[in-house]
Amino acid sequence: MSDISGGSTRRGHGSWRILCQFLAQPLRGGESGAPVRPGLGYRDAGKIQRRGRSFTRGSFSANIARRVKPHGLSRTASAAVELTAPPARRERNADATRRSLLNAAEVEFAAKGFDGARLQSIARAVGVQQALIHHYFEDKDGLYRAVIERGMAAVTAGSWSILEQVAPLHDLARRKSKAHVRELVTSFVGILVDFAAHTTLLAILRHDAEKPASVGSPPALPALRPLLATHFRPVLDAVVVVVLELQRAGTLRKDVDPRHLCVSAMAMACLPFQETQMFAVLWPEADFRAAPMIAARKHEIVETVLGRVLP
């Protein structure tokens, strides 16, 4: 077979055509879209496959094209080997990777706080290179903010959904209905308890939210304040408006402070899931994350709130 630079015989030309056709075939047993480090030959790629990693012939053939093109491989042959994954699949893989990184980061920040969390540990948990974290979130601060914002957005979305179902303020008959009040209280308590029981955001906030925003503090910590203001404060203000309107209609007691009411409901919903060690001593047989206990907590909080607000 002649050299790669061009003066090929009929036999050499056929060999290159066979090579290009071979490289264009999908890799059996490989995972589509997985990258291969530049500069690998068949022997090195075989080692990677034997170690359990996967690669596509598309990415491998593109690597071959980069290596042989400077030596004079024809334009047709170069086009045949420079194959890439479909854009739709790359986008799906990117979304899944980003979600996996957020999930792993949420666990890491909840267990160790901002200072103790390590990007390398988060990347290792997902099975990707740490560079992907910088690609999606820029840095540790950006990843932290994304985790906090995702948790807050889930709660506020449910809260706004309930507020949108509140009876119009001009519907006096329904505003005076105790059944309507029970429905609202039950919905809000359900959101609060489910949030406290099934997410790790409270643990993250407990680690970091009360640290002073002084010189030398992690840059993500002061960012908690605007996030709380953006997601939680508008919901709290809207609930206060609803309580005041129900008080004017005579449906709720007038001696109830709306903001104290919200704080009390939040405390009752969240405390058992925040202070797990304390309640393990005070009430050792209670499993606060078991479904029957969660349902019982919701019922007790609803009845306590209604007992305070209804005339």
Image (spheres, rainbow, N blue to C red):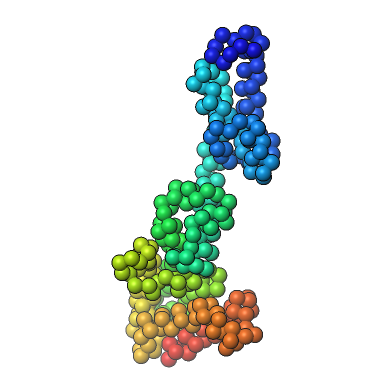
Write the residue at 59% across / 79% down: 288
Location of residue 109 in the rendering, given as x and y in whole percent from the top left corner: 49, 65
Q: Is residue 49 visible?
A: yes
Nearest the eye: 73 or 292 = 73
252 is higher (above) or lower (below) than 158: below
Q: Is residue 125 above or below residue 20?
A: below
Q: Residue 39: where, in percent of width, then height?
A: 55, 32
Relative vertical location of residue 99 with respect to residue 159 in this rendering, above or below: above
Residue drawn at 43 percent across, 83 percent down: 264
Q: Position of residue 258 (x, y in %)?
A: 37, 82
The quarter of the picture where residue 231 lies is: bottom left
Give the quarter of the image for residue 33. top right
For image coordinates 51% across by 55% down, the residue present is: 120
Q: Nearer the viewer, residue 233 or 56?
A: 56
Number of marks in the rendered image: 0
Foreground residue among 11 and 85: 11
Say above or below: 81 vs 154.
Answer: above
Q: Is residue 37 left or right of residue 159?
A: right
Position of the N terminus by quadrant: top right
- Residue 48 rendering spot, x and y as whole percentages: 64, 40
Q: Residue at x 64, y 31 (%)?
A: 42
Residue 150 visible in the picture: no
Front-most of 112 and 95? 112
Image quarter where the C terminus lies is bottom left
